[in-house]
Amino acid sequence: MNLKEYITYVIVQRGNTDYSEALRYFTGILRKDFQTITRQAIGKQRKYLLPELYSDLSERFIDELYGKFKGFSRFKGYVITA
């Protein structure tokens, strides 16, 4: 996996096991033949990402969510959900 593919993999995860996430990502999203990948290989790729990536992705997601759904009530500027 190159860096762009791995970042996309991180973004589209649904919380399943590493193997099922990798299978869904390779066959469904990348439309590539799936080759066996180990948990260790996926974890090894993580060490190349800076931790700031996750906070930046979170900030962008929240900004887009708040911009997309403007009808929510807010408390101190935040949307309250249960």
Image (tube, helix red, strand yellow):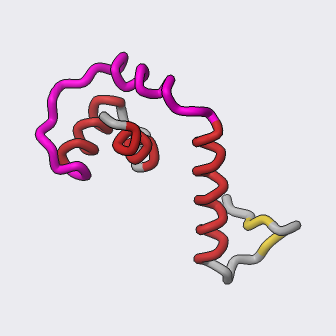
Quadrant in which the C terminus appears? bottom right
Q: Is residue 65 above or below residue 58?
A: below
Residue 32 in percent (x, y) is at 15, 44
Viewer-nearest residue: 57 or 70:
57
The residue most toward the right is 76
The residue most toward the left is 33
Left or right side of 5 for 58: right
Residue at image position (67%, 83%) is 71
Image quadrant where residue 42 sits: top left
Residue 65 in percent (x, y) is at 60, 68
Viewer-nearest residue: 32 or 75:
32
Query: Is 48 included in the stretch rendered in magenta?
Result: yes
Give the number of callouts. Answer: 0
Quadrant in which the N terminus appears? top left
Q: Is residue 34 above or below residue 74?
A: above
The residue most toward the top is 40
Query: Is 29 included in the stretch rendered in magenta?
Result: yes
Residue at image position (43%, 43%) is 7
Q: Which residues are magenta?
A: 28-51
Residue 3 in percent (x, y) is at 40, 38
Image quadrant where residue 44 sits: top left
Residue at image position (64%, 61%) is 62
Viewer-nearest residue: 41 or 77:
41
Residue 34 in percent (x, y) is at 15, 35
